[in-house]
Amino acid sequence: MEIGKKKLIIVGLACLLLVSFPTSVYALDADDLTDLVGYTIIASSYIPGSFRGARRGKVVQLANDMVFEFREYKYSYSYRPTVIIFAFPYSESIILYKLIIDDEIYDVVRLR
């Protein structure tokens, strides 16, 4: 078999493998990010162990010792997910917080 034909077969097989086994991708789209207008990223951390989503009143402690209480319900599951913490200075005494965990944005209250 010619070298050119071998290369063509290898490239074809590689393309077939890429199409046959897509990888999972998590992504927020622009509509999701409109919820974060005015917010600033203040920290990045992770949740030790497994995360089974949020329910109103559920408390989560991050690896950096920040503690938040969820204000809504959303189900998801992940192990040791990365968390991005956002803050918005609503007034001199009130700061609003949001977390991104996996591909979801959560409304939270900071407890510590």
Image (tube, rainbow, N blue to C red):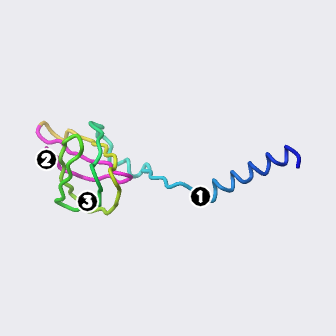
Q: Where is residue 103 in the image (x, y as percent from the top left)?
A: 38, 52
Which quarter of the rendered picture does the C terminus lie within?
top left
In magenta, the rendered stretch is: 93-112
Cα separation, mark 1 vs mark 3, equals 31 Å
Magenta stretch encompasses residue 77: no
Answer yes or no: do the residues labelled 3 and 2 have beta carbons within 8 Å? Answer: no
Residue for badge 2: 111
Majority SS type along the magenta span = strand
Of the image marks 1 and 3, the number of the one nearer the N terminus: 1
**Which element carries disc 2, helix, strand or loop?**
loop
97 is within the stretch colored magenta: yes
Identify the residue at image location x=14%, y=42%.
94
Mark 1 = which residue?
21
Q: Residues within 10 Å of mark 3 (few under 14, many from 20)?
A: many
Report whether 60 appears left or right of 12: left
Residue occupying image coordinates x 19% and y 61%: 56
Residue 27 appears left or right of 92: right
In the image, is 24 to the left or to the right of 44? right
Q: Where is residue 16 in the image (x, y as percent from the top left)?
A: 69, 56
Q: Which of marks 1 and 3 is in front?
A: 1
Q: Which amino acid does label 1 sit on?
A: Phe
